[in-house]
Amino acid sequence: MELTTIKNSIHEIRGKRVILDYELAKMYEVETRVLKQAVRRNIDRFPEDFMFELSLDEMKNLVSQNVIPSLKYFGGAKVYAFSEQGIAMLSSVLKSKLAIQINISIMRAFVMMR
C-alpha cells in the first residue's frame, strides 16, 4: 500500500493522530462492521489512548471538512478512531497476512510523519 494513501488517511482528532475505522476497513479489505466486531470482542486491548468513539460533534466537524461523506453514510453508528498504538493492536485482532502487511505500511507512514 502506498504511504501517500495512508498519510492522507491520518487525521488529527483530540490532539492525536488517528485513522478512522472505515478507512482502516478499506485498507484491510474487510467490512467496517467486521473490524468493529473484532474490536468489540477484544475491547480490553483497546484503552482510550488506543481507540475512542467520535462524538456527534466531531463527526459533524469531519463531514463539514469533507473527511466523512455524510452522517447517513454510517447509518447511525459511531465512528472509531484508532491511534498508532491502536492500529498496531489491530494486527493481533485481525490475523490475516494482508492485515499484517497493511499494519507495517501504516507504522512506516506514522514514522515518516514525525
Image (cartoon, helix red, strand yellow):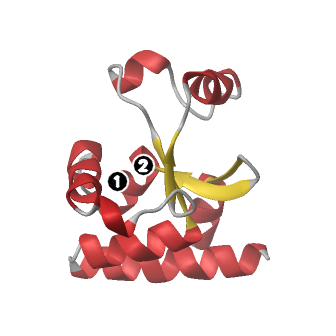
Image-quadrant location for residue 84: bottom right
Residue 13 coordinates in the image, percent (x, y):
69, 46
Residues at marks 1 and 2, CA–CA distance in whole angstroms:
6 Å
Direction from residue 65 to residue 74 in the image, left or right: left
Provide the secondary structure element on which disc 2 rests: helix
Task: List the residue tagged with mark 1.
Answer: 25
Instruction: Using the image as rendered, state which of residue 111 and residue 92 is in the foreground.
Output: 92
Query: Residue 94, percent across and down?
Result: 25, 70
Which amino acid lies under the numbered mark 2 shown in the image of this protein? Asp
Residues tagged 1 and 2 counted as in contact (Cβ below 8 A): yes
| In this view, the mark in front (1 or 2) | 2
Which residue is rendered at x = 68% and y = 21% of the image? 64
Asked if residue 70 can be seen in this view, the reply is yes
Judging from the image, what secondary structure is the residue with disc 1 in? helix
Looking at the rendered image, the quarter that the C terminus falls into is bottom right
User: In the rendered image, which quarter is residue 7 located in?
Assistant: bottom right
Residue hosting label 2: 21
